[in-house]
Amino acid sequence: MKPPFKFLLSLFSLAVLIFTCFFLPNLFSQEKLKEALFYEKREDRLVQCRLCPRNCLIPDKKRGFCRTRENQGGVLYALDYAKPVAIHIDPIEKKPLFHFLPGTTAYSIATAGCNLKCKFCQNWEISQSQPDELDYTYLEPEELIRRVKASNSPTIAYTYSEPVIFYEYMLDCAKLAKQAGIKNIMHSNGYINEQPLRQLAKYLDAANVDLKGFSEEYYAKLCEGSLAPVLNSLKILKEEGVYTEITTLILPGFNDDEPTFRKMCLWIKENLGPDTPLHLSRFFPLYKLTNLSATPPETLEKLRQIALDCGLRYVYIGNLPGGEAENTYCPACKKLLIERRGYFILQNSVENGKCKYCGQAITGVWK
């Protein structure tokens, strides 16, 4: 007895539905295994990563310190390529960048992983994970650019965790963004070797670098890293013409001593220039330092004054809404130029890159 026509049609419809939902997407959206840049092949299938100052020597079937780069048979692969775990549209002020297209939005992405292990990390859920531990959206560079255009954001921000560890993805996206007239910004720990940084810098418009402290002891104890490469990265960004701001998270009892902080401010002034904006960010108990108190507001205000006394012209306090330390003032006539409340711009009196009151040039990238 032949099956009824309607029954066969139902079976066919079910098969089409299953194919459409489960098999068809994979035919057109195959995830690519991306070979890493900046590594050397050694004997016995060993590889040596040259992306960051760790220069990890990685055996076959093992990963580097960042947990995102894996040796497979003597070839190093970037496991996080096109796998962002965080995608948001943020105010540019959240990066934080205060002198770069204020009042605009940044299409912000991050993948899992980091090449430091900061005990105070504020995004530790993703920075201290590896790509196969978190849900992600597979998003190839071409599709990312389409989404950025649709969002009307003038900028892509590589941020949240540590963009150095998704270097190949960032570089490919940045090249396409530049062609499309979209600007590229990076919020980074600056822990990267010179050659990859110089190559990336050709496509970067701006960066905010975390200068976490100003001693090797601090970096070793709290970050499992080193200060010297970060200082070198800051110099390279300046040499390459990348507009740069700096963020320092102030930890009570660790990096808030006045002599060391003063040395840091003088280094910034002498090597990067007095117009380099410095953001002093308030620490809140998180990750492995939950026993530490939040940074007292008076500590932040005292350090801000030291920075100003050292000759830095734009010093801000973050994670402490309200007060004049959120605002931008003209270094010449002292008039209020950009008034902020959190991430919102209340007024902006910078016109054509200058103070509208006295004509003083104001460092930054303006509309």
Image (cartoon, rainbow, N blue to C red):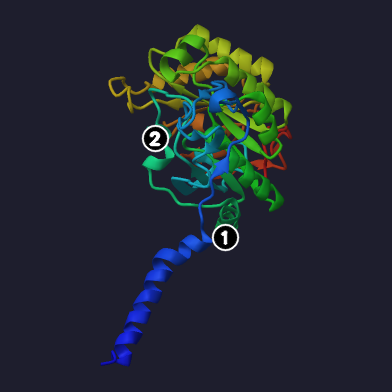
On residue 129, the disc is 2
Relative vertical location of residue 264 with respect to residue 187 in this rendering, above or below: above
Badge 1 marks a residue whose secondary structure is: helix
Q: Position of residue 189 (x, y in %)?
A: 53, 27
On residue 73, the disc is none
How packed is label 1: few (under 14 Cα within 10 Å), some, or many (20 or more)?
Answer: few
Q: Nearer the viewer, residue 99 or 87?
A: 87
How packed is label 2: few (under 14 Cα within 10 Å), some, or many (20 or more)?
Answer: some
- Name the residue located 58 percent from the left edge and 46 percent from the top edge: 156
- Name the residue located 58 percent from the left edge and 33 percent from the top edge: 328
Badge 2 marks a residue whose secondary structure is: loop
In the rendered structure, which amino acid carries the disc numbered 1?
Ala
Q: Position of residue 21 (x, y in %)?
A: 40, 67
In the rendered structure, which amino acid carries the disc numbered 2?
Ser
Outermost residue toward the front?
Answer: 1
Task: Give the mark toward the camera: 1 or 2.
Answer: 2
**Residue 332, can we see it?**
no
Q: Nearer the viewer, residue 322 or 24?
A: 24
**Residue 298, can we see it?**
yes
Q: Position of residue 178 (x, y in %)?
A: 69, 47
User: Would you name the residue on which mark 1 appears?
Assistant: 150
Q: Nearer the viewer, residue 296 or 150?
A: 150
